[in-house]
Amino acid sequence: MTREEALFLLKKHVKTDRVLRHSLAVEAAMMAYARKFGEDEHEWGLLGLLHDIDFEAYPDEHPHHAPELLKDTDLDDDFIQSILSHGSHSSIPRDTKQRQCLHAVDEMASFIIAVALMRPTRLEGLKAKSVKKKMKTKTFAKAVDREELVASIEPLGIEFAEHVDIIVKGLMEHEAKIQKEGYSLLG
């Protein structure tokens, strides 16, 4: 599946800018991690882009409807299982770097975007210290489980600061690319 096909399919099922921007942010973070681990950026990016394809239609059952929405694509079963693995109540093990990364970047990518929106320089110069400070502010993005943000990184064997740096760099690179397509991670 091409990225263009995946984006078309995503937009068929995702109607809000919020979920679309989140999907683009997770795509960026997954591509950044694919580069770090020497993996297929295209595949990892598609996983990030499509991971929430069923969220708007089935928020209480997400991501369990993703397989039916993706059944007529050329995406293999491992790809579908990776989407299913990112759910908080999933029985699919996060037993690959790809699945661990998806879980680790899902909430963090959007949290970082939220932090960037509060800064005059947005993503430029954003450091882990600023993200950590916002994590301590319970009224900021209060629906985000801070303990899970930290715990999700552990299987990757990466320090918090490096995790934030990888995601920020990926978001900045992706922002430049998607602006040419008429999108923005920053609203």
Image: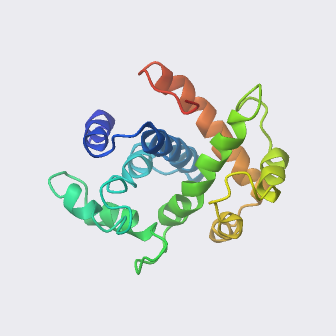
Place of residue 129 in the rendered image (x, y in percent of width and height, measured from the top left): 85, 48
Residue drawn at the location 40% of the way across and 52% of the way down = 47
Image position of 159 (left or right of 97): right
The C terminus - image quarter: top right
Q: Residue furthest front?
A: 139
Give 40 or 50, whichever is nearer the viewer.
50
Tell me if residue 143 can be seen: yes
Task: Return the x and y of residue 84 as percentages of the image width and height.
Answer: 37, 68
Extreme residue in the top direction: 180
Occupied quadrant, residue 19: top left
Query: In the picture provided, is 114 more to the left or to the right than 96?
Result: right
The N terminus sits in image quarter: top left
Q: How many marks?
A: 0
Q: Residue at x 66, y 42 (%)?
A: 114
Residue 94 falls left or right of residue 43: right
Where is residue 5? Give x, y as percent.
25, 37
Scheme by which the image is coloured: rainbow
Q: In the rendered image of this protein, does residue 94 appear above or below residue 163?
A: below
Q: Quadrant of residue 156?
A: bottom right
Give the vertical position of 40 relative to 17 (above or below).
Answer: below
Is 186 drawn above or below residue 149 in the view shown?
above
Residue 70 appears in view? no
Q: Residue furthest left?
A: 72
- Name the residue nearer the viewer: 40 or 173: 173
Q: Residue at x 36, y 64 (%)?
A: 63
Residue 6: where, in percent of width, then height? 29, 41
Decide which of 99, 57 is in the foreground and name it: 57
